Image (cartoon, rainbow, N blue to C red):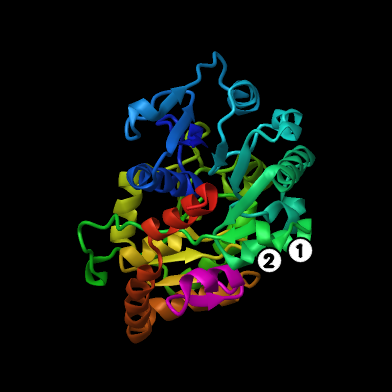
Amino acid sequence: MALGIDASRSVKTIQKTGVELVSDELLKTISNQQPAISNLEIIYYTPSKIDWLPAENQRILRWPFKFLWTQIRLAWELIFHPPEKMFFPVHAMPFLLIASYQLGVTNYFRIIHDIAFKKQPELYSFRQRMILNLDLSLAKKLCAKIFVPTQAVKDDLLKYTKTNPEKIIITPWGYTSINNKQQTVNNRKKQILYIGRVEAKKNIEILIKGFQLFSQEHPDYQLILAGKIDEQFKKNHNSLFPSLGKRSGAGTIHNSIELLGFVSEDKKQQLLGESAALVLVSKEEGFGFTLLEAFDFGLPVVASDISVLHEVGGDACEYVNPNSPEAIASGVEKIITDKNLSSKLITAGHERLKFFNWSKTTEQILGEMTGE
């Protein structure tokens, strides 16, 4: 049996955020588990070599342009040299696959990380909504199974797309510890950390307002925003970005709030090791992977009071209303000043990590795709 996997988002030139990091961990575990499955050949389709995947399993599809590799080059390969199974862990499926769908040569599988564009359409351009809707329709029509990380995402798919519920499989992400220093709260800096894209759907404007309220009583604290800054968000909120560097997007606003732009994995781990707490107050999330990273590094967490973050965070977060700057400020205040609460959340976070295992997740996904 030949199982193809779109590994294009695992190349080293990609600035990887949550979904790409999840995909990398999944592909690493698939590679480790492959020998245990009889008669399974895995083909990793990629535009360039990926050092940490087996070279003999990579099919490098050269393409002279920086765009449309998936929609044209990969589509061509899958139409004219189709594998029995094809898995898309991150990226959109090629629209041209609809042309060969009736032949029934390949069974397609897909991860859908979230459908926030359905719930918050005002945060997306018409072009973005059109592409995302087409991609979602394609997945619904072509895929034998759709994998989602949480019950919340499955519920959204059932509500907004009327997909057959038996086709949607919940596979919570795993977690591998990245904390080698075993940092303790006692040597933390007075900084509150956010990790993720700086964009409207992450509720950054309300987060900043909440932190400004908090800093009135705690002026010695900083808010660190570590993640790529969305250009549309920057344009729509230019009053927030008076001193940012034009090229990097890095800079300081209102003295106590620092935007770092995209950060490397090493820098992210440094920030997790030295910060006092993590905040994630998005109105929509597919999973909320940074919660697990915070638990790993012993950070207390302030999180949105939304179902998906309760599903992942359990009793290890201080939950707040994401629409209220006052509630966010109060939540941060509580975990900074109440040491008993902070200690309780940190302990619960370490326990919570035990629920997330990549081997179990990968075994479930491979089992659904191979029938074993």
Q: Position of residue 325 (x, y in %)?
A: 60, 71
Residue 174 versus residue 10 in the image, above or below: below
Q: For mark 2, what is the residue?
A: 155
**Residue 251 visible in image:** no
Name, please, the residue furthest toward the top: 64
Question: Looking at this view, is 54 or 306 the one in front?
Answer: 54
Task: Kindly state the secondary structure of the residue where label 2 is placed.
Answer: helix
Q: Position of residue 283 (x, y in %)?
A: 63, 64
Task: Kindly state the secondary structure of the residue where label 1 is placed.
Answer: helix
Q: Residue at (41%, 78%) from the top-left corner?
A: 335
Please tell me whether residue 305 belongs to the stretch shown in magenta. yes
Q: Residue at (51%, 47%) from the top-left corner?
A: 370
Image position of 119 (left or right of 74)? right
Q: Position of residue 38 (x, y in %)?
A: 39, 43
**Residue 34 visible in image:** yes
Name, please, the residue furthest toward the left: 181
Q: Residues within 10 Å of mark 2 (few under 14, many from 20)?
A: some
Name the amino acid type tagged 1.
Answer: Lys
Residue 45 versus residue 354 in the image, above or below: above
Image position of 120 (left or right of 315)? right
Q: For mark 1, what is the residue?
A: 159
Give the magenta range. 303-321
Q: Position of residue 128 (x, y in %)?
A: 73, 40
Residues at discs 2 and 1 in contact (Cβ within 8 Å): yes
**Rendering quarter of residue 87:** top right
Please tell me whether residue 127 belongs to the stretch shown in magenta. no
Q: Residue at (51%, 41%) from the top-left corner?
A: 244
Name the amino acid type tagged 2.
Answer: Asp
- Cα separation, mark 2 vs mark 1, equals 6 Å
